[in-house]
Image (tube, rainbow, N blue to C red):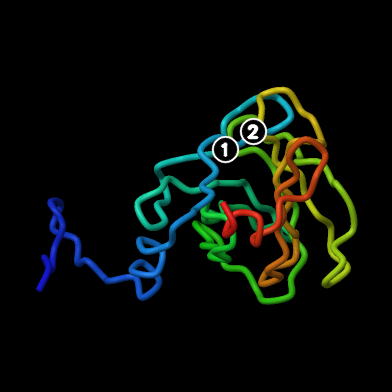
Amino acid sequence: MGERFDEKGMLIIPNPRQPRMIQAANLLVITHCFCPQGHDLISRRASFNGYPGLVLGVTADERKGLIALSPVYGEKVRLALEIDLEAGELVHLHCPACDMALPVHSACPSCGGEMIALFLQPQADFSDCVVVCNRIDCPNATIIHGGQLVAQSMIDAM
């Protein structure tokens, strides 16, 4: 049996998905992701299976806070920080460092929301980006690298 508390005295709650993630032969983890101004959106403020998460500013009506996304491609985990969000709600996403709105890449083919671009390099380039839907609980997210869509099956075949 493992430890019950971490070094800070916080209760450790096992992640039921973690064993599967450890056993996965190929895993694509986003280690850097940028706003249009070049601020890195990866932060240790939120951790997913030991990897720092993507932390974005979020605005919904008059409410403001943060949302953290798992950096593991295919893992559809999102956490709202400092804000209560409702399923199906459309939100505005922005950089938590400079407050710049993150640009729209396209319409979401799943729910009609907007696919928001997060760039893989400090220079904004829509041919190298991660796109996530701005509708709460829509699982649609994609990686575009070199102008090509990266499919989960491509990672599994590596």
Q: Is residue 27 left or right of residue 134?
A: left
Mark 1 and mark 2 in contact (Cβ < 8 Å)?
A: yes
Residue 147 horizontal/vertical position (percent): 82, 39
Residues 14 and 91: in front is 14
Q: Say above or below: 72 vs 95.
A: below
Q: Is residue 141 left or right of residue 97?
A: right
Q: Secondary structure at mark 1?
A: loop
Residue, disc 2 = 34
Q: Identify which residue is drawn at 73% across, 39% down.
A: 145
Q: Say above or below: 59 vs 138.
A: above
Q: Secondary structure at mark 2?
A: loop
Query: Tag on residue 157?
Result: none
Density class for disc 1 (Cα within 10 Å; few <14, some 14-19, many ≥20) is many
Q: What quarter of the picture does the N terminus occupy?
A: bottom left
Q: Identify which residue is drawn at 70% across, 46% down.
A: 130
Q: CA distance from mark 2 to mark 1?
A: 5 Å
Density class for disc 2 (Cα within 10 Å; few <14, some 14-19, many ≥20) is many
Residue 108, quarter of picture: bottom right
Q: Identify which residue is drawn at 73% across, 34% down.
A: 100
Residue, disc 1 = 41
Residue 62 horizontal/vertical position (percent): 71, 57
Residue 39 horizontal/vertical position (percent): 61, 28
Report the amino acid beneath label 1: Leu
Residues 119 and 152: in front is 152
Q: Earlier in the sequence, mark 2 or mark 1?
A: 2
Report the amino acid beneath label 2: Phe
Residue 86, quarter of picture: bottom right
